[in-house]
C-alpha cells in the first residue's frame, strides 16, 4: 500500500458521548464509548464496508469522520489534511469533497422542500453557479440517478422509498465529491429495490471514481459491494481484511459467529451448516466489559481476555485482527 | 402427500380498507391450508398483504375501515368468520397465538413482564395467581431467560430487544397454542439475536408440536426454518411450494427475479445484481391483469388481460402465472 493512493486515514479515533446528571448543574457521570480508538485507511476509489450490530458505533464512526460529531480524540486525515485541526472555513471547503447518504430516506429529506431545492441546496450553500446553471445541474443529477428530470417540482412524499434514496444520492453527488459515507443506504428498502440502489451506487463509482465508506448490517450486501471489510463490535474494530479473505478466512471469533448467523438463501445448505449461536446480548457501550470487549459472549474466551485488551494487529498481510487466540478460534469454531 | 390434519383453511380471503383516497385492496383472494405441526413461511415485500392477511384471520383489524370477506376461514373445523366477538376472544391467545414484529411496542410498558405472561393463563386457563406465577416462571425459563423468577417483576424497558421478543414468545406459548403466527419477529433485531430466536422457536416447536406461520421479507430466514413457503405479491399468493423446490426451482417470475436479485456468495467480483425494475402496483387502483406485469420480464398479452389463478405445476407446487419461465412461452 503506497501512501499516495490513501484518501482517508483514520488514526486512534475516539468518540465518547457524555452522560450527565442534573438539570442546571450538569455533572458528567459517565460516557457512552461509541467509538473507542479505531484506526484504518481508505484507498482512493475503493469501497470499505463497515459492518456490525446496532449500537456498535458504525454510524458514529461515519459521522465522526465527516466531523458531524466532534471527535473526542484521534486524527482523521483526508488527502493528508487533518480534519480535526482544520478550522471551520477550511472544513467547509473540504466538505464539498466529502458527502453522506443517510439511512432513512423518509426522514432525511425535508418534506417542505421540492426535490429541486433539496438537490440544489448544497450548490447554493457553496455559491456554485448561477440559478440557471444550478437548475441545469439538478436536472442532470436527476438523470444520473435514474429519475425523470421533470420531477424537480415535486415533494418527497410523492416518491417511493427507493426513489427517495435516489434523491438522497443525487444530493450527495451535487458537489462532485470524492468520498461518500453511505450510512445504511439500503436498510429501509425492500429486497427488490435494494438491488436497484446498490447497482446505482456501483455504476456511479465506476463513472465518477468515487470512494465509499459503506456502512451496513446486511453482510451479503456488504460482501457484494465492498473491496475491503471492517467488522465492529462495541466501538472497536475487531477485524479488517480484503473482502474474500474476511468472508472465507475470518480470524476473529465474533466475525466467525456473525458470518455463521447470516441466513443463506439455500435450504439444503442452511440445514447442514454449523451455526455458532452467541449467548446473551451486546453489553452497553456506557459500561463495556474489561479487557477484550467480546469476552462476555466469546465461546473461546480465557482469563487473559477479561484482563488484557488485545492489540489490533496485522496477523497476515492486509488482514488485521484484535484477538489473543486467533489459532484457537480457527481450530475450535470452524 | 401430507396426511397431517388441516388446522387452518383459508378460502378466498379478501381484505379491503376504506380510506379517504379510496379502497385499498390489501388482500385479494388468497387460499391456502396449514397442517398440524407444519412450518409455513410467508414472504413478500412491504405492502404485499402478508401481515394484513394474518391480522384478518385473527380478526384484529377494525371493521370498518377494514372489511374482511372470505368463503371460509376454518380453524380446526370452525369458521372463524361466524364466531362472535366473545368466542373470538376466547380462542385468540389460547389456541391461536401471535407474536408481533416490534418487541419494543407490543408489550405494555406500565405492566410487569410477569403480569403480561400471567394474563392469558388466568383468563384462558382459569389459573389462580399463585399457579400462574409458577407457570409464568417456567415459561420464561423455557424461552431462555436466566433468573426467571425475579425477572417476572421487571418492566419491559428493563429487557433488551431480544429478551422482549423472548417474553412475547412466552406469552404466545402460555396456553399451548395449536397455531403460532409470527409476524416478522426478528426484523427489528440483530443477526446474532435473530439466530438465537430462530433456534429457540425451532426447539420449542419440536417440543410442543404447534404449527407455525412465519411471516418475513427475508428469504434467508425462511430457507432454514420453513417446510413450505408462500410468496405474496400485491395481495395475491403467487407461488406456494415446498421450501427446497422454491429455492431450487422457482416457477413464478417474481420469485425467480427476487432470488436472482440477492447477492450470491460464490459470485465473481464486480458482478452486477439483477434487479426487478419498477415498483409494486398501487393498491388503490389494481390492474385487471396480473399485478406483476409491469415488472415481469416474461409478460405476454394474455397477462395484461387476465389475472392467472393459482394452479399446480408440480406436486405440491402451485403458481399463479400464465407463463412457463423455463421456455418463456405460455403454459
Image (cartoon, rainbow, N blue to C red):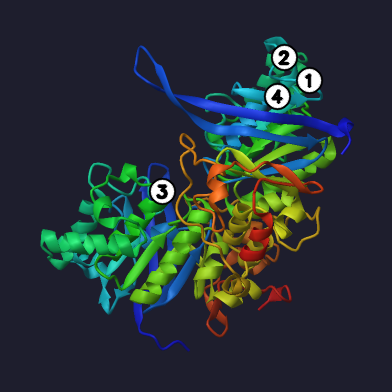
Q: Badge 4: how crowded within 10 Å, few (<14), some, or many (20+)?
A: many
Q: CA distance from mark 1 to mark 2?
A: 8 Å
- Chain letter for the residue marked with disc 4 in the picture: A
- Give the spatial CA distance, label 1 vs label 3: 41 Å
Q: Which residue is mark 4?
A: A75
Toward the viewer: B4 or B231?
Answer: B4
Residue B73, horizontal then vertical, whole percent: 32, 71
Q: Are marks 1 and 3 in contact (CB under 8 Å)?
A: no
Which tag is nearer the camera, tag 1 or tag 4?
A: 4
Q: Residues within 10 Å of mark 3 (few under 14, many from 20)?
A: many
User: Which residue is under mark 2?
Assistant: A86
Q: Which mark is residue B34?
A: none
Mark 4 vs 2: CB contact within 8 A: no
| Foreground tag (4 vs 3) | 4
Quadrant containing the N terminus of chain A in the rendered view? top right
Query: Label 3, on which residue?
Result: B161
Q: Are marks 1 and 3 on the same chain?
A: no
The local crowd at label 1, few if under 14, some if 14 to 19, many if 20 or more residues have their Cα within 10 Å, is some
Where on the picture, by quarter, is residue B331? bottom right
Marks 4 and 2, how far apart in space? 11 Å
| Callout 4 and callout 2 share a chain | yes
Q: Which residue is mark 1?
A: A81
Figure check: A271 above or below A307 = below
Query: Where is residue A66 drawn, in percent x and y?
Result: 67, 26
Q: Is residue B294 visible?
A: yes
Where, by quadrant of the figure, is residue B244 drawn? Answer: bottom right
Amino acid at each position: 500500500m503506497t501512501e499516495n493512493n490513501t484518501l482517508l486515514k483514520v488514526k486512534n479515533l475516539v468518540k465518547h458521548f457524555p452522560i450527565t446528571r442534573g438539570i442546571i448543574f450538569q455533572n458528567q457521570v459517565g460516557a457512552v464509548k461509541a467509538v473507542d480508538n479505531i484506526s484504518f485507511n481508505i484507498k482512493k476509489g475503493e469501497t470499505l464496508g463497515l459492518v456490525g450490530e446496532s449500537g456498535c458505533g458504525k454510524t458514529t464512526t461515519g459521522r465522526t469522520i465527516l466531523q458531524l460529531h466532534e471527535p473526542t480524540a484521534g486524527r482523521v486525515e483526508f488527502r493528508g489534511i487533518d480534519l480535526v485541526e482544520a478550522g471551520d472555513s477550511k472544513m467547509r471547503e473540504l466538505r464539498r469533497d466529502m458527502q453522506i447518504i443517510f439511512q432513512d430516506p423518509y426522514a432525511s429529506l425535508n418534506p417542505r422542500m421540492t426535490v429541486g431545492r433539496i438537490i440544489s441546496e448544497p450548490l447554493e450553500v457553496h455559491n456554485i453557479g448561477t440559478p440557471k446553471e444550478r437548475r441545469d445541474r439538478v436536472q442532470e443529477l436527476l438523470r444520473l440517478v435514474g429519475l425523470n428530470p421533470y420531477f424537480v417540482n415535486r415533494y418527497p412524499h410523492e416518491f417511493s422509498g427507493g426513489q427517495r434514496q435516489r434523491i438522497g444520492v443525487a444530493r450527495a453527488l451535487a458537489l462532485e465529491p470524492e468520498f461518500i459515507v453511505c450510512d445504511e443506504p439500503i436498510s429501509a428498502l425492500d429486497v427488490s429495490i435494494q438491488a436497484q440502489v446498490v447497482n446505482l451506487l456501483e455504476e456511479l463509482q465506476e463513472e465518477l471514481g468515487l470512494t465509499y465508506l459503506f456502512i451496513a448490517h446486511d453482510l451479503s450486501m456488504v460482501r457484494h459491494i465492498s473491496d475491503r471489510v471492517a467488522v465492529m463490535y462495541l466501538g472497536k474494530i475487531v477485524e479488517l481484511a480484503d473482502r474474500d479473505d474476511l468472508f472465507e478466512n475470518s480470524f476473529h471469533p465474533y466475525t466467525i459467529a456473525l458470518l455463521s448467523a447470516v441466513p443463506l438463501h439455500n435450504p439444503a445448505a442452511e440445514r447442514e451448516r454449523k451455526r455458532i449461536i452467541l449467548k446473551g446480548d451486546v453489553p452497553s457501550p456506557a459500561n463495556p466489559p474489561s479487557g477484550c470487549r467480546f469476552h462476555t459472549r466469546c465461546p473461546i474466551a480465557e482469563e487473559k481476555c477479561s484482563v488484557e485488551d488485545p492489540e489490533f494487529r496485522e496477523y497476515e498481510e492486509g488482514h488485521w485482527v484484535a484477538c489473543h487466540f486467533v489459532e484457537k478460534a480457527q481450530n475450535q469454531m470452524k | 402427500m401430507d396426511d397431517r390434519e388441516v388446522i387452518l383453511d383459508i378460502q378466498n380471503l379478501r381484505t379491503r380498507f376504506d380510506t379517504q383516497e379510496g379502497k385499498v385492496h390489501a388482500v385479494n383472494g388468497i387460499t391456502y391450508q396449514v397442517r398440524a405441526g407444519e412450518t409455513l413461511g410467508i414472504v413478500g415485500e412491504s405492502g404485499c398483504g402478508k401481515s394484513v392477511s394474518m391480522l384478518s384471520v385473527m380478526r384484529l383489524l377494525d371493521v370498518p375501515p377494514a372489511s374482511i370477506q372470505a368463503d371460509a376461514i376454518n380453524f380446526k373445523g370452525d369458521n372463524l368468520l361466524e364466531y362472535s366477538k366473545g368466542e373470538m376472544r376466547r380462542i385468540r391467545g389460547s389456541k391461536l397465538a401471535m407474536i408481533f414484529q416490534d418487541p419494543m411496542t407490543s408489550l405494555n410498558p406500565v405492566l410487569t413482564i410477569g403480569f403480561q405472561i400471567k394474563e392469558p393463563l388466568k383468563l384462558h386457563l382459569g389459573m389462580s395467581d399463585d399457579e400462574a406465577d409458577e407457570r409464568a416462571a417456567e415459561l420464561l425459563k423455557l424461552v431462555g431467560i436466566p433468573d426467571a423468577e425475579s425477572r417476572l417483576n421487571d418492566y419491559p424497558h428493563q429487557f433488551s430487544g431480544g429478551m422482549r421478543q423472548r417474553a412475547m414468545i412466552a406469552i404466545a406459548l402460555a396456553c399451548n397454542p395449536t397455531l403460532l403466527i409470527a409476524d416478522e419477529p426478528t426484523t427489528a433485531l440483530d443477526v446474532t439475536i435473530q439466530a438465537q430466536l430462530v433456534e429457540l422457536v425451532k426447539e420449542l416447536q419440536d417440543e410442543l408440536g404447534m404449527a407455525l406461520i412465519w411471516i418475513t421479507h427475508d428469504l434467508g430466514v425462511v430457507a432454514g426454518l420453513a417446510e413450505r413457503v408462500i410468496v405474496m405479491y400485491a395481495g395475491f399468493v403467487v407461488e406456494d411450494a415446498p421450501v427446497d423446490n422454491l429455492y431450487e426451482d422457482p416457477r413464478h417470475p417474481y420469485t425467480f427475479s427476487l432470488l436472482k436479485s440477492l447477492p450470491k456468495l460464490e459470485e465473481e467480483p464486480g458482478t452486477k445484481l439483477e434487479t426487478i425494475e419498477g415498483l409494486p402496483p398501487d393498491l388503490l387502483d389494481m390492474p385487471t391483469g396480473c399485478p406483476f406485469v409491469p415488472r415481469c420480464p416474461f409478460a405476454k398479452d394474455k397477462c395484461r388481460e387476465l389475472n392467472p389463478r393459482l394452479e399446480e405445476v408440480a406436486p405440491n407446487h402451485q403458481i399463479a402465472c400464465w407463463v412457463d419461465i423455463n421456455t418463456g412461452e405460455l403454459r
